[in-house]
Amino acid sequence: MKNGIYLLANDKVYDQVVALLNSIKANYSQNIPVCIIPFNEKTDLIEKEIVKRNNVFLFENKKSIEKWENFITEVHKIYYTSLSEIKIKKTEVLNMHRKYCAFDGPFEKFIYLDSDTLVFQPLDHVFSKLEKYDFVVHDFQRKTAIKKGTISNFLEVFKDVYESEDALAERIHCAGFWGSKQNLIDEKDLDIFIKELANNEVKIFGEWLSEQRILNYMTLKKRFDLYNFTLDEKSEYKTGVCVTSPHFKEKNHILFDQEKRLTYLHYMGVKNDRFERLCRVAQLNFPLKNIYIKLSDKLLDWQISSIPYKNVFLYYRFLHETGKN
């Protein structure tokens, strides 16, 4: 298959997946293939939802899943047996790294989306950039890397390639929205990564071995030609993307940043339980639900009334059920 979208999900993020799929259908295409990489075996609700959608299917390449799990397991071993100067080390569960299976999937060109995302316009402009570039992103992760000082770890490893933190920062990207191509990272690459991480490059990860930092390490090691929409001052698509930005304006269930339509919104940092509680309250068949939400927050600490752009999320979550798509 030529172009497609990957998600990583299980039943814990069912509400987010439904909302995302509905937003893709409403604002992009009802025919674009969507492949869901299973986070684990708990996908009963996801599989029931897939039956309703002709363009959505599960990733079933078990060899790919095993390959990446073995790779990350080895990286974890290197990380925990190295860096004696770091007293507290943090890693993410192996399953989070299954998103890398996108390199082994059926799509020649693909876009990976975290499940806590909404799409607000066609993604053809992302796929078109993949005609020229190896890796396409749309985020401001570089600013976070500079602010938190993590960019210095990367520069220590890549100082022979990038002369300054600012130059390297332009290559740092988020792992929640990215486009790339089939087989650009293969088993030979993984062997090289393991060898060079064991040869002290593991220091690049500092106190947190996250799937995002590993993806950045791999794209830097491969020297991918990278394009970031937020670095292109001439791009009509340069907008904010994160739910923590309070200035987006809604019009007809679409968010805008200074009159520019967002390509996507990432509900980064909003925990799964908050989405689940929000959706369960939204399904209640009685008036004054907003009052119930506020009481739930006050008495049970549900933290749902404070979810930014929650009404936009609810619109897409229940779009199919209301017969509007």
Image: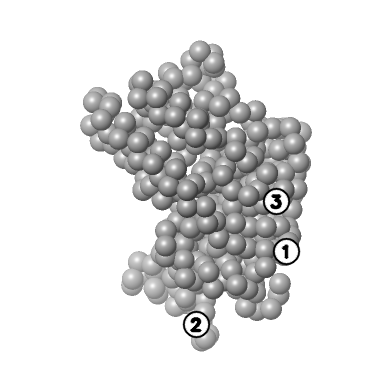
- Badge 2 local density, few (<14 within 10 Å), some, or many (20+)? few
Numbered label attached to residue 292: none
Residue 277 appears in which quarter of the rendering? bottom left
- The residue that appears at 23% across and 26% down in the rendered structure is 84
Q: CA distance from mark 2 to mark 1?
A: 29 Å
Callouts 2 and 3 close, C-beta under 8 Å: no
Dot 2 amino acid type: Leu
Dot 3 amino acid type: Met
Q: CA distance from mark 2 to mark 3?
A: 41 Å
Residue position marked by numbered label 1 in the rendering: 30
Q: Is residue 171 above or below residue 89?
A: above
Callouts 3 and 1 close, C-beta under 8 Å: no
Q: Which is nearer the N-term, disc 2 or disc 3?
A: 3
Residue 7 appears in which quarter of the rendering? bottom right
Residue mark closest to the camera, 3 vs 1: 3
Dot 1 amino acid type: Gln
Q: CA distance from mark 3 to mark 1?
A: 16 Å
